[in-house]
Amino acid sequence: MLEHARERLAQRHRDTPPEELVAALVTSILDNSGYPLSATRTDAGQIRIRYRLRSFSEPIL
């Protein structure tokens, strides 16, 4: 995935680091899911994933 992002960015002559693009994609997918997961990007370019504990009686939508 990283290599594909790197190639597409080069084709479009963009200076965006491919790691930033992949991190944004993963963060977007996790934050918009119905699961009790959230993701944030750190200043170091890493992705911090959090799991929010939920009751067993609380349904996953």
Image (cartoon, rainbow, N blue to C red):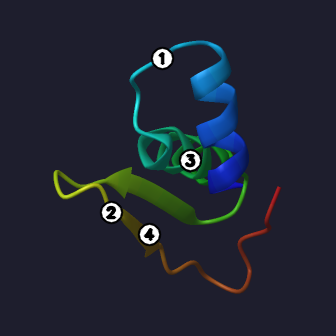
Q: Residue at x 48, y 17 (%)?
A: 14
Compared with 53, 30 (above or below) is above
SS class, disc 1: loop
Depth check, mark 3 against mark 4: the one in front is: 3
Q: Earlier in the sequence, mark 1 or mark 3?
A: 1
Q: Where, quadrant-wise, is the C terminus in this rendering?
A: bottom right
The disc at residue 23 is none
SS class, disc 4: strand
Q: Which residue is mark 3?
A: 22
CA gap between label 1 and label 2 equals 21 Å
Q: Which residue is mark 4?
A: 49
Q: Residue at x 56, y 47 (%)?
A: 22
Compared with 19, 44 (above or below) is below
**Neighbour tally class for label 3: few under 14, some 14-19, many 20 plus, Cα within 10 Å:** some
Q: Hey, what amino acid is under mark 1? A: Arg
Q: Earlier in the sequence, mark 2 or mark 3?
A: 3
Depth check, mark 1 against mark 3: the one in front is: 1
Q: Earlier in the sequence, mark 3 or mark 4?
A: 3
Q: Measuring from the top left, give residue 24's x and y in whole percent.
A: 50, 41
CA gap between label 1 and label 3 equals 15 Å
Q: Which residue is mark 2?
A: 46
Write down the quadrant of residue 11 in the picture. Answer: top right
Q: Hey, what amino acid is under mark 3? A: Val
CA gap between label 2 and label 4 equals 10 Å
Q: Residue at x 79, y 68 (%)?
A: 59
Please indicate whether residue 46 sits to the left or right of residue 28 in the image. Answer: left
**Neighbour tally class for label 2: few under 14, some 14-19, many 20 plus, Cα within 10 Å:** few
Q: Residue at x 40, y 38 (%)?
A: 17
SS class, disc 2: loop
Q: Hey, what amino acid is under mark 2? A: Gln
